[in-house]
């Protein structure tokens, strides 16, 4: 019997788009022969997915969901908007989110092996069943799970999903507290901050910004002759703008540009006679970072009939 390694399974999954467990079973049955394993997967009804493995799944849905103080943001990709609007697909994504909350899997591979919430099959098996109905490549790409006072927000029917975490001595069921979280989630969705606050900004990122600013001033005839220590002070002043653009709590509040997000949060906390602090957030945008293919429709049809 051939020695089937995790690398072999991952390679077959990359070639076919089929789930890890099915790939492993096929390799075992094929005694390690990758080409034969692909044929086995096709014979088991996964042929279409194997043929479509080269297609990019960059559409889909992002869901943000909270239940009993536990929340998640999860992205499940599909090839087309059409499938993303399919009710069966939406239901599956919501069940995946609930599974993450209930089972706390370590990563996507662990999630795939977890029993899908409300069913007797694993998430991976549920995904395969859905594929056999929809016949389109689908992938669970990523998720984050958080616990605490959490407020979710989904924008554009699943284009962007946000989860904001708060710390407060105010009753977690207070509508005003929820409103603060929702406003912060809207801020994150709209302004896409890179960090929560300036303390989270890596030192090397700050140094790189300073280097760029120094280079720009060195090339400016009006600045070129100024002493280096003067330029350094100017840079220190400019770096403050970097924080206000990239740190959530220092950004100008989208609903009132006269105050920062932190000032808004503090003002609500004061009116409620307590404290509120934004301690974290997650923002997923559907398909971000995925390289989409540029095939036009005519090319796609031609490729299908080859």
Image (cartoon, rainbow, N blue to C red):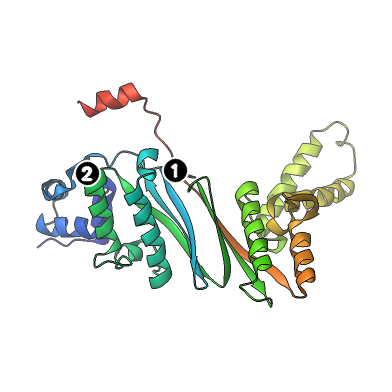
Mark 2 residue crowding within 10 angstroms, few (<14) / some (14–19) / many (20+): many
**Residue at 63% across, 53% down:** 186
Where is the C terminus found, in terms of image quarters?
top left
- Residue 158 placed where, x, y %? 48, 48
Mark 1 residue crowding within 10 angstroms, few (<14) / some (14–19) / many (20+): few
For the residues labelled 2 and 1, the Cα–Cα distance comes to 20 Å
Q: Label 2: state its secondary structure.
A: helix
**Residue at 68% across, 62% down:** 180
- Residue 279 placed where, x, y %? 64, 67
- Residue 278 seen: no
* Labels 2 and 1 touching (C-beta < 8 A): no
**Residue at 46% across, 44% down:** 287
Q: Label 1: state its secondary structure.
A: loop
Give the quadrant of residue 79: top left
- Residue 41 placed where, x, y %? 15, 49
In the image, which disc is placed on residue 50?
A: 2
| Number of marks in picture | 2
Tell me: 119 left or right of 211: left
- Residue 218 placed where, x, y %? 80, 37
- Residue 203 seen: yes
In the image, which disc is placed on residue 4?
A: none
Name the residue at the front extreme: 175
Give the quadrant of residue 261: bottom right
Residue for badge 1: 290
- Of mark 2 and mark 1, the one earlier in the sequence is 2
Tell me: 289 left or right of 241: left
Tell me: 95 left or right of 260: left
Where is the N terminus found, in terms of image quarters?
bottom left
């Amino acid at each position: 019997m051939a020695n089937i390694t995790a690398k072999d399974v991952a390679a077959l999954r990359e070639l076919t788009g089929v789930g890890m467990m099915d790939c492993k079973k096929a390799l075992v049955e094929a005694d390690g022969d990758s080409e034969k394993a692909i044929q086995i997967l096709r014979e088991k009804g996964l042929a279409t997915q194997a043929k479509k493995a080269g297609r990019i799944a960059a559409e889909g849905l992002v869901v943000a969901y909270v239940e009993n103080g536990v929340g998640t943001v999860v992205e499940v990709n599909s090839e087309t908007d059409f499938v993303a609007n399919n009710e069966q697909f939406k239901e599956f994504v919501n069940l995946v989110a609930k599974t993450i909350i209930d089972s706390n899997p370590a990563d996507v591979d662990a999630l795939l092996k977890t029993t899908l919430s409300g069913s007797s099959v694993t998430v991976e098996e549920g995904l395969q069943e859905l594929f056999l109905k929809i016949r389109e490549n689908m992938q669970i790409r990523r998720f984050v799970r958080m616990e605490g006072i959490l407020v979710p927000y989904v924008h554009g029917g699943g284009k962007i999903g946000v989860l904001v975490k708060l710390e407060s001595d105010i009753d977690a069921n207070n509508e005003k507290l929820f409103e603060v979280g929702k406003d912060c989630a809207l801020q994150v969705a709209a302004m896409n901050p890179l960090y929560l606050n300036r303390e989270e900004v890596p030192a090397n990122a700050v140094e790189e910004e300073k280097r760029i600013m120094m280079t720009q001033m060195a090339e400016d005839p009006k600045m070129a002759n100024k002493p280096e220590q003067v330029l350094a002070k100017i840079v220190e002043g400019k770096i403050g703008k970097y924080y206000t653009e990239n740190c959530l709590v220092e950004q100008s509040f989208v609903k009132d540009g006269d105050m920062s997000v932190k000032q808004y949060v503090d003002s609500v906390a004061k009116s409620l006679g307590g404290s509120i602090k934004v301690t974290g957030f997650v923002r997923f945008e559907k398909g971000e970072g995925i390289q989409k293919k540029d095939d036009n429709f005519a090319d796609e049809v031609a490729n299908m009939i080859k």
